[in-house]
Image (spheres, rainbow, N blue to C red):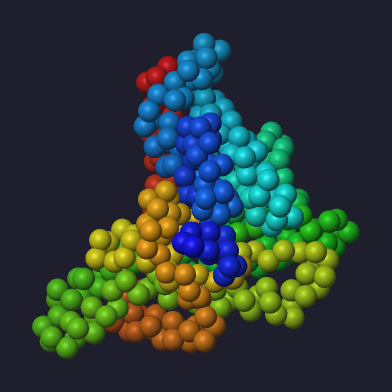
Amino acid sequence: MVINRTKGLAEFGQSIWLDNIQRNDLTNGTLKRMIYQDGLSGLTSNPTIFLKAITGGKEYDEQIGKLVEEGKSAEQIYDRLTMDDIKEACKIMMPVFNDTNGDDGFVSIELDPRIAYDAEKSIAEATRFFTEIDLPNLMVKVPGTSEGIPVVRKLTSEGFNVNVTLLFSSEQYEKVALAYIEGLEERAGQNKDISHINSVASFFVSRIDSKIDLKIDALIEGANDPTVKGELKKLRGRAAIEVAKVTYGKFKKLFFGASFENLKAKGAKVQRPLWASTSTKDPIYSDVKYVDSLIGAHTVNTLPPATIEAFRDHGVLRLTLKEEDMELSAIVLEKIRAVGIDMESVYQELLDEGVKAFEKSYIELINAFEKKR
């Protein structure tokens, strides 16, 4: 019997979420089929994904036309289309949510990226999403900016599910995880139920390699010693996986140590690391590099359709997130720093670029709606 590799990841405690949303997939049975065929147990979206979906065909045109006739603005049209798609996806995922007792089956919607640095507006918009969609398997995506940290804590204390996105460093992750824990503690301190709250921390892996590999390539180009060139080449494509492994080690200490036991006794769920940006950008690397290398318990990997197909075809099912590897990962990262790469500045660049990229997609969507109007 041939094992479906994507479905087999569940045996290692890893959930697979789809990094895509498209109305046709919601209406023609594709998403339901992937739940059965691939063991799909969640879905994520962002403005870039919606830009491709809405401008890539005519499936939204009829609804856009009706909204234009109603006098809706471009922003209102975007809001209605995305809310409708997310709500429908939540309904399709609801059987997974029910079958897992609320541990999985989530659908994530991104806050307006223009308010990524405004905590008050972020909290207000997230609250509106939860109120309007009104389904227990909705997650709101909050960027892991310094302004986003209090938003994570506040929404968690209000009993909402949060997907903290655009994480690039283990230090940034730790702040996010502590905000989630503090939100749970605040709610538990008010004698309110915390057993239904779920959260993930989305770590964008391939973008780290894309950025750092460019810096390593420049060092290789400037090196004269063949031995130095060879050592530098060994560091290509290493940073992202090693940072993710160090982060996973911090996750295990935070959520499986004595300090979380009190909350766990009250029904609290761990905040799972979610591996995002998992499509391979450099053709030199395997197209399933960021799936094969990050298989472990209590994690989520969110994959675009092409990467799901690739892993289904030739992925390798084996445990690759091992605690004994964490120390080695730290050594590799130290070697990267030792050649002169400022990792902290890279992480900040990636965060700033990520927020700007989502904002750019949002603005392009609004402009596209203006043209259609």
Q: Is residue 154 left or right of residue 313?
A: right
> Is residue 88 visible to the viewer in this orientation of the structure?
yes
- Work out whether residue 146 or residue 47 is closer to the camera in this orientation and state it: 47
Residue lying furthest top: 69
Residue drawn at point x = 57 percent, y = 60 percent: 15
Q: Which quarter of the figure has residue 272?
A: bottom right
Q: Is residue 218 left or right of residue 126?
A: left
Q: Is residue 105 above or below residue 219?
A: above
Q: Is residue 214 left or right of residue 78?
A: left
Residue lying furthest left: 224
Residue drawn at point x = 12 percent, y = 87 percent: 225
Q: Is residue 284 above or below residue 224?
A: above
In the picture, the quarter occupied by the C terminus is: top left
Residue drawn at point x = 44 percent, y = 25 percent: 59
- Work out whether residue 119 or residue 152 is closer to the camera in this orientation and state it: 152
Residue 301 appears at what percent x and percent y? 51, 60
Residue drawn at point x = 62 percent, y = 49 percent: 106
Residue 147 appears at what percent x and percent y? 57, 55
Residue 67 appears at what percent x and percent y? 53, 17
Q: Is residue 372 left or right of residue 319?
A: left
Residue 16 appears at what percent x and percent y? 53, 57
